[in-house]
Image: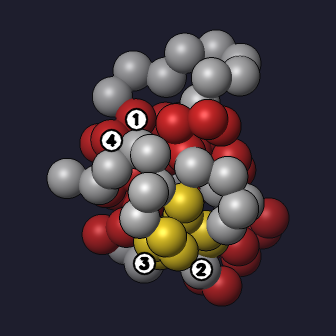
Amino acid sequence: MPHLNAVYRRTSSGQHAAINRPDLLPEAPRRVLLLLNGITPLDALLTHGTPLPQPEAALQWLLDRGLAELVQQA
């Protein structure tokens, strides 16, 4: 299971999906994908906005499909 206190970024496929095909992504993974910036740990990004149930599962969905990748483990 991914760690929420780590830094993640969109892959090139993830960037393409976020910009051109966000309608094809389930809601929770889409929200997580749009937050990823490659600089800020995901748990810090999740503190803003509407709470997201099961963010670990949404992140794992993105990782499994090559839409996001780990940059740095905290």
Label 3, on which residue?
66
Identify residue for label 4.
Answer: 56
Q: Is residue 22 visible?
A: no
The numbered mark at residue 55 is 1
- Of mark 2 and mark 4, the one earlier in the sequence is 2
The furthest residue to the top: 50
Q: Give the CA separation, mark 3 to mark 2.
A: 7 Å
**Pointers 3 and 1 in contact (CB under 8 A)?**
no
Query: Mark 3 vs mark 4: which is more N-terminal?
Result: 4
Q: For this rendering, which residue is in front, 63 or 3?
A: 3
Which quarter of the picture shows residue 20?
A: bottom right
Give SS at disc 4. Answer: helix
Q: Amino acid at mark 4?
A: Glu
Q: Secondary structure at mark 2?
A: loop
Label at residue 11? 2
Residue 50 place in picture, x, y as percent = 64, 14
Q: Dot 1, crowdedness within 10 Å: few (<14), some or many (≥20)?
A: many
Q: Are marks 1 and 4 in contact (CB under 8 Å)?
A: yes
Question: Which of disc 2 and disc 3 is earlier in sequence?
Answer: 2
Quadrant for the C terminus, please.
bottom left
Q: Position of residue 73 (x, y in %)?
A: 41, 64
